[in-house]
Amino acid sequence: MENTTPALLRYIGNFISYIVHPLFIPTYFFLYLMQVLPYEFVGITEWQLTLRLFSVFWLTAFFPAFAVFLMWRLKLSDSIFLRTQKERIIPYVITMFFYWWMYYLSRNFTDQPLALKFFYFGIFIASALGLIINNFMKISLHAMGVGGFLTAVILVGLYYSVDNAIWTLLAIIITALVMSARMIVSDHSKQELILGFFIGLLTQVMAYFWVI
């Protein structure tokens, strides 16, 4: 069926999908915590904090993305966009490993917010559930990412005594934009988008009560 969506809307949808890619969510959450809870990063210099931010990006975005690139170059996948369920299996396993590693490291850090611990644990659980559900349907990773991000932002506001209203509103807007963008430019069904969102939401709640 021919795609009748205006070209401008498709361009905007793709742009939003790239900017708020699920691999970038951990980095964005770390940046958010740097702004909202700077006093929780006690005992480290600004340079050390920048290096820690870079390490989050390196481990949760660069390495998984590089693994997908290698899969494509080695002909293990037809596209770097992972359009089929089969192509998503190895990337799921790789991201699970890095998310677990980030959670494992966060348990030993006393100079960063506790929120990072439940966030990392939550995205690890989400990726594990995603891998299981991938056997039955191609769940939306973007929806899972923004669902987890929005929930984590709300939980930060509940746990810490901070004015989180503007950040929560921003997270809601970002979530709405990403969900709308994926409806426009992806081949996901509404059920795959909704399920992805609720997995991201529920796994963050589960991780929060487990860690806190």
Image (cartoon, rainbow, N blue to C red):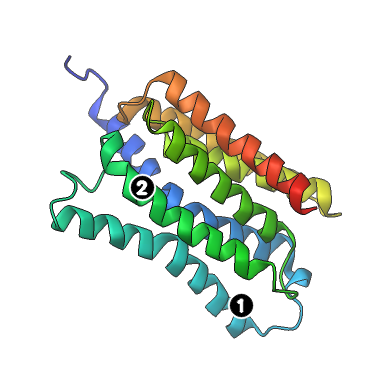
Give the labeled residue for mark 1.
Answer: 49
Q: Quadrant of residue 28?
A: bottom right
Percent position of residue 117, x then y: 68, 59
User: Can the viewer see residue 184 in this picture?
Assistant: yes
Q: Tag 2: residue type?
A: Tyr
The residue singled out by tag 2 in the image is: 18
Query: Which quarter of the picture shows residue 2?
Result: top left
Under circle 2, the secondary element is helix
Residue at 77% over, 69% down = 40
Q: Residues within 10 Å of mark 2 (few under 14, many from 20)?
A: some
Question: Would residue 176 be found to the left or right of residue 35 on screen?
Answer: left
From the top left corner, tell me how far across and down residue 21 is, in percent: 41, 48
Residue at image location 70% in from the left, 40% down from the top: 205
| Quadrant (top left/top right/bottom left/bottom right) for the N terminus | top left
Say left or right for 10 vs 180.
left
- Establish if 108 lies above or below 208: below
Secondary structure beneath dot 1 equals helix
**Which residue occupies the foreground of this view, 96 or 60?**
96
The residue under the point 78% across, 48% down is: 157
At 22% from the left and 55% from the top, the residue drawn is: 71
The correct choice, above or below, for 38 with respect to 152 in the image is: below
